[in-house]
Image: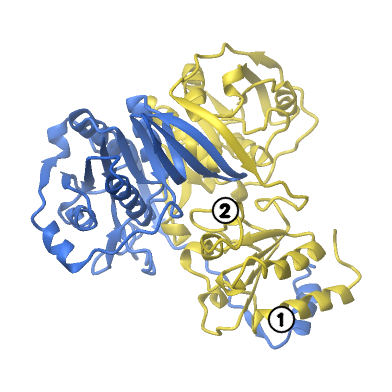
Chain colours: A yellow, B blue
């Protein structure tokens, strides 16, 4: 049987984590079909057809798919589900919102947020904020799976030429209405895929002080992250939150500034390759996961850090 | 308007999780248990809506072992009017919980069902969406703001890209983010009063729902440990280490 991958896109381009999801899907079964549901989304469908690991693209277009509402998307997937043994999607807010709505209709016990494919029915997933890894085996005939994108490498994005088929659109679910989306546009790398992330916590003391983080991030071409405490305090918007209920990041370098390191925050960043902690409390739990810890007042350390970085002339862009 | 709120008993969010040596799960004996944190936000929001005069009754429901009743009792102490405890043993998967909640909804006919967006034990993030699917109701997941209008809700949802606003007709399901509100603490008099509020008990099997897991947990293990790091004494040393040792800048 084949794997149906639900593509996350913005009607024009693929969202980058779709590439990671394709890799995971191909580890389950090599016959991966990509489902692109949207409105005027032929560019996204074409991009999906160019992924060498994708064997077929199915597009379903209608005006009511413009804003990715799960209530409209789920029936489309369910209608196509007969032909597939697995339905797969990224475990970000798009997939988390959508997949259980599909799984329930198929009477399937969903396997959420897998980090490893052991076999077509056995997967590894983190539980308790990543403080334990569970190996689980699904006994459902049809499996609904969301994958943690940062645990799989992105697939090749060009060279393929899978056929593109169209399938019939379903009816609109009239009880849910999209009003608006406020996306925070930024020239920085995306938090989820950035090579370097600089994060601030409660220790920043104000939103204004995040300028210190911003200047370091500018210098390193890094994304900006935050702990829940910093978001709750209104220092920075929710799309920056790293942690159990925010984003999971796995950069080459994660710099945690003024973040104590609650387990819920560690859940979102402790797989980073190199972790730096800057905190004036030497007992802060963040130091237990840090490769390099600097016990210092961040308001002194960050300007010095910027100065030292300015001295280096080999900063990678 | 009637609001049903689903709550779950989980290991307290402050407890350091320990994996059992035999690989069958995590240690729960003599470990502090609490209400799943975003479920507290769900209760708080329902109680606030009732206090504003827009709801008439808040019912707290839980599914789980005998002691799970504590979470319902806590909900009653912060303002829920009555409770329902559906007794079931062992791991109850979200698909089974949502089928149980569907039965409760059919019986109680609430206008809204609230719950946390995710339980911090299994981190599944499924139950609300599954219940919406089974009932064919609108779903507003990851809600950080709810405005009750006539027969409708306007909900701001936290999504990866930022914020999204949707309008949903009632009846509907809302799953709550931690930023939705600040849950209150129960006062001692209210804890005493909550002891007199009714909790209806029933078994999952009485509702005709099969709770046998469909996912077999083969083993549970500790995640790989990070090797111990070092403390650096100055910013200059830190930058040199990052450049020459870790080679990440």
Q: Is residue A206 left or right of residue A262?
A: right
Point 57% across, 71% down: residue: A259
Q: Quadrant of residue A6?
A: top right
Q: Is residue A158 above or below residue B200?
A: above
Q: Position of residue B208 (x, y in %)?
A: 17, 30
Judged by depth in the image, the label closer to the viewer, 1 or 2, is 2
**First reached walking from the N terminus: tag 1 or tag 2:** 2
Q: Position of residue B30 (x, y in %)?
A: 23, 69
Judging from the image, what secondary structure is the residue with disc 1 in? helix
Q: Is residue A110 above or below residue A60?
A: below
Name the chain letter of the residue that bears numbered label 2: A
Q: Position of residue B93 (x, y in %)?
A: 32, 42
Outermost residue, right side: A313
Q: CA distance from mark 1 to mark 2?
A: 26 Å
- Res. A238 mark: 2
Outermost residue, front side: B53
Q: Is residue B144 visible?
A: yes
Q: Quadrant of residue B133?
A: top left
B179 or A113: nearer the eye? B179
Q: Quadrant of residue A286?
A: bottom right
- Res. A301 mark: 1
């Amino acid at each position: 049987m084949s794997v149906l991958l639900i593509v996350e896109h913005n009607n024009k381009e693929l969202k980058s984590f779709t590439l990671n999801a394709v890799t995971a899907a191909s580890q389950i079964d090599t016959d991966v079909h990509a489902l692109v549901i949207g409105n005027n989304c032929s560019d996204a469908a074409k991009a999906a057809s160019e992924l060498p690991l994708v064997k077929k693209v199915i597009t379903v277009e209608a005006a009511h798919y413009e804003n990715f509402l799960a209530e409209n998307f789920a029936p489309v997937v369910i209608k196509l589900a007969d032909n597939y043994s697995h339905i797969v999607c990224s475990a970000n807010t798009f997939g988390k919102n959508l997949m259980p709505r599909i799984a329930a209709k198929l009477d399937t016990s969903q396997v959420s947020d897998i980090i490893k494919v052991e076999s077509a029915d056995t997967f590894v997933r983190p539980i308790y904020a990543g403080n334990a890894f569970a190996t689980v085996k699904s006994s459902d005939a049809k499996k609904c799976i969301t994958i943690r994108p940062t645990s799989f490498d992105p697939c090749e994005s060009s060279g393929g030429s899978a056929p593109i088929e169209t399938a019939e659109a379903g009816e609109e679910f009239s009880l849910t209405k999209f009003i608006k989306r406020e996306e925070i546009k930024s020239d920085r790398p995306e938090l989820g895929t950035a090579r370097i992330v600089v994060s601030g916590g409660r220790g920043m003391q104000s939103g204004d002080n995040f300028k210190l983080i911003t200047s370091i991030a500018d210098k390193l071409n890094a994304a900006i992250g935050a702990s829940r405490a910093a978001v709750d305090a209104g220092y920075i918007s929710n799309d920056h939150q790293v942690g159990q209920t925010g984003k999971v990041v796995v950069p080459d370098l994660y710099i945690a500034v003024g973040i104590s390191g609650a387990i819920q925050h560690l859940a979102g960043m402790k797989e980073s390759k190199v972790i730096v902690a800057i905190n004036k409390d030497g007992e802060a739990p963040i130091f237990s996961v840090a490769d390099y810890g600097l016990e210092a007042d961040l308001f002194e350390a960050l300007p010095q850090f910027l100065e030292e970085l300015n001295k280096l002339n080999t900063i990678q862009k | 308007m009637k609001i049903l709120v689903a709550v779950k008993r989980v290991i307290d969010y402050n407890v350091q999780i320990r994996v059992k040596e035999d690989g069958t799960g995590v240690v729960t004996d003599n470990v502090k248990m609490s209400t799943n944190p975003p479920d507290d936000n769900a209760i708080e929001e329902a109680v606030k809506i009732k206090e504003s005069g827009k709801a008439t009754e808040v019912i707290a429901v839980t599914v789980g072992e005998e002691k799970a009743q504590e979470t319902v009792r806590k909900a009653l102490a912060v303002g829920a009017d009555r409770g329902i405890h559906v007794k079931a043993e062992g791991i109850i998967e979200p698909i089974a919980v949502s089928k149980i909640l569907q039965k409760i909804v059919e019986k109680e006919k609430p206008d809204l069902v609230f719950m946390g967006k995710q339980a911090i034990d299994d981190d599944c993030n499924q139950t609300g969406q599954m219940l919406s699917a089974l009932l064919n109701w609108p779903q507003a997941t990851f809600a950080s703001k709810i405005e009750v209008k006539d027969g409708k809700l306007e909900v701001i949802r936290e999504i990866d890209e930022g914020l999204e606003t949707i309008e949903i007709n009632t009846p509907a399901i809302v799953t709550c983010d931690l930023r939705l509100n600040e849950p209150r603490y129960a006062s001692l008099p209210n804890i005493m009063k909550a002891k007199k509020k009714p909790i209806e008990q029933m078994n999952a099997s009485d509702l005709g729902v099969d709770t046998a897991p469909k996912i077999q947990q083969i083993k549970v293990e500790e995640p790989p440990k990070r090797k111990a790091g070092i403390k650096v004494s100055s910013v200059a040393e830190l930058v040199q280490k990052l450049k020459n040792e870790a080679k990440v800048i």
